[in-house]
Image (cartoon, rainbow, N blue to C red):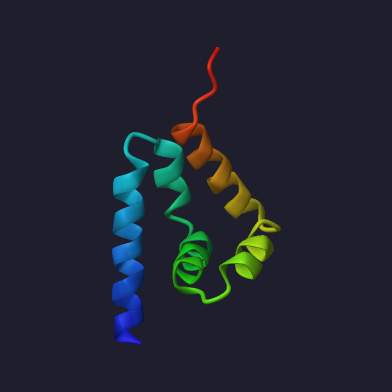
Amino acid sequence: MRLMKIAELYGVLCLYKCAGESDMIRDMLSNQHLVRMLCHLDMTRRPDVDVEAAMHEPIFTEFVDECLRIVEPQSK
């Protein structure tokens, strides 16, 4: 159990670092449900099945959309 908490904390710290300048990502990462989902997805042996299930969760799709907006900004 203690290793799981350490893994979750490490995952959160990595996500904060990757969030860079996005206040929205940082705010989303304060949602413990989202953090647990991301940790689960990071460690799952069935990523295809679990990501598909996660895509039905609004907080997860909002997070993914924001990440994609940062990584692949739309040209105007």
**In-image side of 67 versus 57 (left or right):** left
- Quarter of the picture containing the C terminus is top right
* Residue 8 or residue 72, whichever sits in front: 72
Up-down relation of residue 44 to residue 20 (above or below): below
- Residue lying farthest to the right in this orientation: 56
Residue 61 coordinates in the image, percent (x, y): 62, 49
The structure residue drawn at horizontal position 33% and vertical position 77%, both measured from the top left corner, is 5
Residue 36 coordinates in the image, percent (x, y): 48, 68
Up-down relation of residue 1 to residue 30 (above or below): below
Q: Quadrant of residue 43?
A: bottom left
- Quarter of the picture containing the N terminus is bottom left
Q: Quadrant of residue 20?
A: top left
**Label tally:** 0
* Residue 72 or residue 24, whichever sits in front: 72
The structure residue drawn at horizontal position 53% and vertical position 17%, both measured from the top left corner, is 75
Up-down relation of residue 63 to residue 12 (above or below): above
The structure residue drawn at horizontal position 49% and vertical position 71%, both measured from the top left corner, is 40
* Residue 61 or residue 75, whichever sits in front: 75
- Residue lying farthest to the bottom in this orientation: 1
